[in-house]
Amino acid sequence: MAKDEAYRKAKEQIKQARRKRVLNLSHIQLTEVPEDLASLTQLKVVDLSHNQLTEVPEAMASITYLQELYLFDNKLTELSEAIASLTHLEVLDLSDNQLTMLPEAIASLTKLEVLNLSGNNLTELPEAICSLTQLRELDLSGNSLSDLPETMSNLSNLKLLYLSNNILTMLPESLGLIEVLQELYLGNNEIKAIPNSVSQIKTLKKLVFSI
C-alpha cells in the first residue's frame, strides 16, 4: 500500500471512530499517524501494530484515558516522552521494534499491568521500569540485556517474567523477593546458576533455564 493511500485510509478510520472506544489501524503500512488522532480522547484501545512507524505519534499524548496500546512490529527506534501522558495505560506492546533504550518517563505508567518489549535492541533497563509496581507480566526476551536492575524486586505483583534470548550472566539476588512470581523464562542466556532466593520462591510453578 502506497504511503499516501495508507495515510488517507488512516484519516478515514479516525473519522469513523469519533464515538468508538477502539481504533484499529494495523496492517496498513502506515509511516505517519494523522494529527486527527488527538481528537479521539474517548479511546480506550489503539492498535497501530504491523506498520512502518519510526516513532510514537505525539497525538497519542492527548488520549489520556487510553488503556491498551499496541505498537508491535513497527520500526520504532525510541520511545517519546509523550508516553508519560498515558497514565491510565494497562497494556503496552512494543515488541518487534528497534528500541535501544527506554525513557525515564516510562515510570509515569503506574497502572501498567502488561509490558511487552521482546524482540528489540535493549542493552540495559532504566531504574524507572522498576517503578511499575502493578506489572503482572513483563516480556524482555530477545534483546541484548547483560544485567538487570537490583530494584527489580519492587515489581511485587509480577507473575510472568520472560528473559530468554539475552546475554545475561547472572540474576540479581533481589529477584527472589518477588513473592508472587509464577513463571520465569531464562533460556538462551549465559547464566551459570540460579540464585537460591529465586529457586525458593514458593509460588514459582515454571522455571525455564538452560546452560
Image: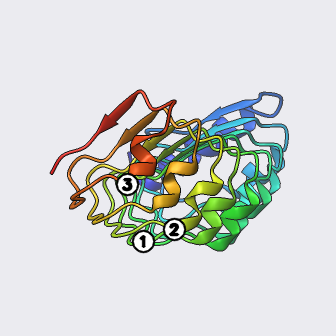
Which residue in the structure is indicated by mark 1?
A: 100
Asked if the residue under mark 3 is in contact with the one under mark 2, i.e. CB atoms within 8 Å, the reply is no
How many neighbours does mark 1 have within 10 angstroms: few (below 14), some (14-19), or many (20 or more)? some
Q: Position of residue 1 (x, y in %)?
A: 38, 45
Q: What is the three-letter code of the residue carrying label 3?
A: Pro
The image shows residue 178, relative to residue 21, as above or below, that is below
- Horizontal side of residue 170 vs 130, given as left or right: left
Q: Disc 2, disc 1: CB below 8 Å?
A: no
Tell me the number on the disc at residue 149.
Answer: 2
- Characterize the local packing of mark 3: few (<14), some (14-19) or many (20 or more) Cα atoms within 10 angstroms: some
Q: Secondary structure at mark 1?
A: loop
Could you tell me how far apart the alpha carbons at marks 2 and 3 are, in whole angstroms? 15 Å
Q: Which of marks 3 and 2 precedes in the sequence?
A: 2
| Residue at 78 percent of width and 27 percent of height | 20
| Type of amino acid under label 2 | Pro
- As drawn, is 90 to the left or to the right of 118? right
Tag of residue 195: 3
